[in-house]
Image: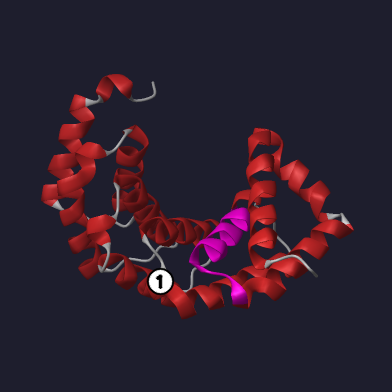
Amino acid sequence: DALHTLNVCTLFHRLAKRLSKEGSRLGERTREMQQLSVWRRLLDLVLRHAPNCNNMELTNCLWAIATLEAKGVDEEATAKELLRHCMKHLETFGPRNLALSAWALAKMGYRDLEWCKRWADSSLARMRDFDTRDMTMLVWAFATAHWKDEAFLSKFCQHVEQKIEQGGPQDIGNTLWALATLSYRHEGALAAITAQCMQKADIFDQ
């Protein structure tokens, strides 16, 4: 109980980061950990400290639950509480935190249209500061959540035109996947992405 909010969130994040290196054994290791009383204790600490979390701490905790693919009643309750506080402080989120938290929510299976709309509006206001990695995570999240907003996608694709040349193969591939999944075609963005595919074909995974 004497732990500071920063300590709790850092511990939670580092635990997930460490276990994420388990690769194909991640699911098994997560399930083993969920049987431990210390895991329940840690979740309870995150839940109780959520009202005091800043944007980075909220993002890191959501990322941890999503990365661990930890499912259960307690995990769901903790994620919902983190989301509630994200909603309250979303205007303080920078590009990376917006993108990572969106990625986490989509990976956890959240299909609530409210969070997608809120994240889209906040992101458009800051899109000039997004790098290609952040843009890719954001549109991947919306596509995974099956949320399509023509106005957002139109503006988003204008930024794709300007920035996709800075992206790597994964950014390019995931952006294409997201737009295809959402059945959204933007000629300018498509032309820019195609040009990058041609230029960087030799570094794409075979």
Does residue 45 appear left or right of residue 91 in this picture?
right
Quadrant holding the C terminus: top left
User: How far from the left and from the top, in percent, is residue 92?
Assistant: 40, 71
How many numbered circles are shown? 1
Image colouring: secondary structure
Out of 76 and 15, give the one closest to the viewer. 15
User: Taking 31 as reference, is 145 above or below it?
Assistant: below
Q: Is 25 left, or right, of 32 in this rendering?
A: left
Q: Nearer the viewer, residue 123 or 116?
A: 123
Q: Amino acid at mark 1?
A: Thr
Q: Position of residue 4 (x, y in %)?
A: 69, 66
Please tell me whether residue 5 is drawn above or below residue 204 in the rendered image: below
Q: Is 74 placed left or right of 14 in the picture? A: right
Going 67% across and 41% down the picture, which residue do you hit?
A: 18
Find disc 1 in the rendering and name its residue. Answer: 92
Q: Mark 1 falls on what kind of element?
A: helix
Q: Which residues are magenta?
A: 52-66
